[in-house]
Image (cartoon, rainbow, N blue to C red):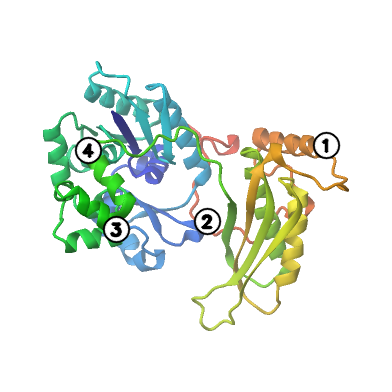
Amino acid sequence: MYALVDCNNFYCSCERLFNPMLEGKPVIVLSNNDGCAIARSEEAKALGISMGTPAFMIREIVKNHDVKVFSSNYTLYGDMSDRVMQTLAGFVSRLEIYSIDEAFLDMHNMEHTNLLKLGIQIRRTVIKNTGIPVCVGIAPTKTLAKMANRYAKKRWREVGVHWAANQDLIDEMLAATEVGNIWGIGHQYALFLKTNGFKTALDFVGAPEEWVRVNMSVVGQRLYNELKGIPAIKWQFEARTKKNICTSRSFGSLLTDKALILEAACNYTANCALKLRQQNSCAREVIFFLQTNPHRTEDKQYMMSIKLKLESATNNTPELIKYVSKGFELIYKPGFNYLKCGVIVDSLVPESEVQYSMFSDVDDGKTKRVNSAIDSINRNIGKETVRFAVQGFEKKYRLKAEMLSHRYSTNINELIKVTR
């Protein structure tokens, strides 16, 4: 058996956790630069606020219904996610973290356990330990567990748990799920299935296996097996090593200042370098790109990227910054209103397999010690406490976040203050 535990309206739940006055009120969380709604409480959904709706399009709803709006507080959400996952890890021998607010739990060694009671216990314990409400779906495959989780939210919201313990319960769940809501079915496949008369997941399961194989390739066959209770999606207990790493963000406002754009590029490069070290990888190539806002038709448009091959693969921040700075000088053009830039480190190799040139004068041991010391300080004292001069400190290009809540659980200066 598999269990899928999913936090309810996670970002909104994190905001409510430290501000009880928000209980029962419509709450939304906006994307980077306060662009559009990416999380909505049930009350906000009831008002008709859809996922991805731009903030400027819902101003009247926000004003008329006193909707509480927050900028994305990823520091808070990441910390609360860690706490939820640590709690879940105490119930099973293995779990797979699927996203910031979801995890699959391995229940294959629990044949004699009442999984419904266990699901209820998991839900109560997570709420007790973290304050975050969750729903639990339990079923024979990952796809069915995902469906059971959704079914719990829609049908058994007060209980928050659904255990598809037998075929009758599985069929009931399949019949209540439209093909477009099956995990792994994209828009095109959903449209294709509906066109061919398959309205629900139960309809799809009743399709001839050969028809599925011919019309939906290996992906459809895998999904078909999963829905029939045959596990076809492997466990992934450890995060896969990334094949490339990208840091790319829009600026808080349009920029023309060359120095500010370069400062942003250097900070994004440092972030990529840190991620490389965290997974013990080095990059052999770096890509830098720069662009204006294509939606501002009144502005002159410019979009350009450049790929640079490194002399030796590295995860050393200064070395990567050197290459990105060179790329920046080659493609930057004055006279444009720039919206965004980004850095991609590519062609990754394990740190232990880096080959240096015969004439390389890099002191690899010293470089590793310096980077390790900087990473340790930043991890223990605060992100980017120690940085290189080209990264600057003011970050005038930073994302717009005018409604950002406190980092209640990670910053001692932003702890909740209780007064009598």
Residue 131 location (% of width, % of height): 38, 32
Q: Amino acid at mark 3?
A: His
Q: Amino acid at mark 1?
A: Lys
**What residue is shown at x 45% (from left), y 62% (from top)?**
35
> Counting other residues with Cα less than 10 Å from the Cα at mark 2, is it few (<14), some (14-19), or many (20 or more)?
some
Give the number of the mark in front: 3 or 1.
Answer: 1
Callout 4: helix, strand or loop? helix
Q: Determine whether the residue tagged by mark 3 lies in a helix, strand or loop.
A: loop
Whichever of callouts 4 and 3 sits on the residue coming sooner in the sequence is: 3
Q: Which residue is mark 2?
A: 401
Query: How far is mark 3 from mark 2, CA to CA?
Result: 22 Å
Q: Choose between 344 and 310: the one closer to the eye.
A: 310
Q: Amino acid at mark 2?
A: Ala
In the picture of the structure, the residue carrying the numbered disc 3 is 65
Frontmost of labels 1 and 4 is 1
Q: Where in the figure is residue 106, as x and y percent of width and height?
A: 36, 27
Residue nearest the viewer, comparing 332 with 57:
332
Location of mark 4 (residue) = 152
The Cα atoms of the two marked residues, 1 and 4, are separated by 54 Å
Cα gap from disc 4 to disc 3, whole angstroms: 29 Å
